Image (cartoon, rainbow, N blue to C red):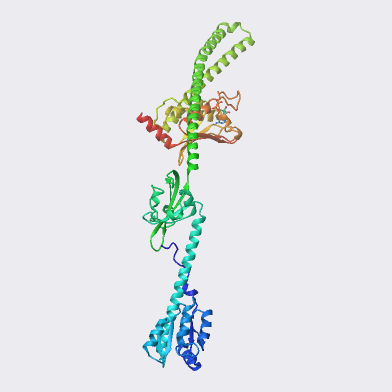
Amino acid sequence: MSLTSPVKAPLATVIPDRVKLLLVDDDRDNLLALQAVLEPLHQELMLAESGTAALRLCLEHDFAAVLLDVRMPEMDGFETAELIRARKRSRHTPILFLTAYRSDEQLFRGYDMGAVDFLFKPIVPEVLQSKVSVFVELSRTTQLLQLQAEERARAERRFRAVLEAAPDAMVITHEDGIIELANSRADALFGRTRETLIGRDIRTLIPGWVGAKIAPEGLGSAHSVREERMTGIRNNGTSFPADITRSPLATPEAILTITAIRDATEQVVAEERIRRLNIELERRVAARTKELTQSNEALQQFAWAASHDLQEPIRTVLSYSQWLSQSLGSSLEERELKMMQMIEEHANRMHQLLGALRQYLHVSESGQQEWKAVDCSAVVRTAISTLQGMIDETGACVEYEALPVIPSIEILLIQLFQNLIGNGIKYRSLEVPVIRVGALHTEHGWHFTVQDNGIGIDPKYFDYIFGLFRRLHGVQYSGTGIGLAICKAAVERLGGRIWVESAAGSGASFHFVLPEKANDKQASSSISS
Ligand code: ADP
């Protein structure tokens, strides 16, 4: 099984164009004749005039073939061939004997000495050329195969080094789960030697393991890598939580699976701690919320009770002071009359404040008001009719375009528009008040605006004015400082938000957005309940 990727650069390009051929003959003329015949093959020809010279050359060069004359003085062709074969470098070099004799004895001896062929003199040039060409081709092919094998071995070594350097235990398996390779971290993690890991079914180490499949998007896509928490089993039978990442590896022979395994024991402990902390946190938040809700309810009850209970004594003060001014009116001095008026005025104001406070409590309490489809144009008409006296008095003009029908709580919308339109008229400039009401559908929901041409508001008070009892203007404008707090509470109960845009002296624009989704949800929950 090979784990290398296919060789990219064509190896043929690294093989030299010409191979070396060794021609050996004691007769110089014969040598030159051989050289002339083989020249057209365009290979590197080396000449030796004796067996000894040929052996020397074989020590220094690799030959594609040796053409060896059999009959030579001192060392004949067979002896030379025997010594060529005896050397490691030239053990497999093909040898072609050149001989004038066709004797069987010579043939056997020659083949014994490692001859691959015999050529009989007189040499036929075409035969010699074609036989030598075969060896030239053979040599080139052998070199190519050798280079490929070396390249493959290098790539495998690189791959194993990468595997070894990985931060996790790495195991490479066949499709059937049998382990082909593992790194030393895998040995350590499972407490096994490499030999006992290779060839073992990975499911004996990780019972839940399944092979990785190549995603339709192909190798390298995010889907072809999967991380899961499984159980790993060590050699001593103990188990541990293991984070497993598997990815497919395509080789020319098969699809393998690379499995990275990480001991997740510490992570599991940390996760468990976080889980417990979260439960504890949720418990505390729930307890605190309960406490807050209880104290909030208690406060609201108190505020209700106070606003109701104070109403009665105020009314009594008011009616007694009115009775006193009526019955003693003529006998009272101017200073005493003024005092009586002050008592009445303050009692009236107290009465108003308590009324507004009750209204605020009513809007902000989480009671069950009915959600239904509300026609905002009708709501604005109701608000206008409530404010009719003020409108007639100031000559104010309230303009509104066709407004939407939305799921909402009608009474809250009436209070909202009544307060905003009322303020627009109340905080008028020297001009005749003109109030414009509009609505725009946006991605956040319905965006309403109530715009006036009054005295405007300094931007530094934009947040301030939405608080309870917050007033910017003193006695010249009557009011409780609760109107905008009511608007804010109403919008928030409807799941929206409210803000103002203005510059002192150039009118004010109040905006509020009511989200559609929240409205839909609330509406459907109230319809179903
Ligand atoms: P109030 O009863 O005083 O009108 P609100 O809560 O309605 O109470 O408003 C708070 C303060 O915000 C007001 O006292 C006023 O100073 C300022 N305000 C509200 N609406 C406007 C407006 N349209 N133009 C200018 N000032 C405004």
Which residue occupies the foreground of this view, 431 or 312?
A: 312
Q: Position of residue 344 (x, y in %)?
A: 57, 14
| Residue at the image position 38 percent from the left and 87 percent from the top | 105
Task: Please give left or right for residue 322 compared with residue 413 in the image.
Answer: right
Of the four image quadrants, the one with ligand 1 is top right
Does residue 10 show up?
Answer: no
The residue positioned 47% from the left and 63% from the top of the image is 156
Using the image as rendered, state which of residue 505 and residue 147 is in the foreground. Answer: 147
Q: Quadrant of residue 456?
A: top right
Q: Residue furthest left?
A: 528
Residue 263, image x and y in percent? 48, 46
Image position of 299 with respect to 97: above or below: above
Q: Residue 441: give x, y in percent of width and height.
A: 44, 40
Q: Nearer the viewer, residue 28 or 91?
A: 91
**Residue at horizontal 52%, vertical 19%?**
354
Classify residue 474 by image quadrant: top right
Q: Quadrant of the C terminus?
A: top left
Q: Which quarter of the rendered picture does the N terminus lie within?
A: bottom left
Residue 336: in sight, yes or no?
yes
Residue at (63%, 8%) from the top-left corner? Answer: 333
Count of numbered marks: 0
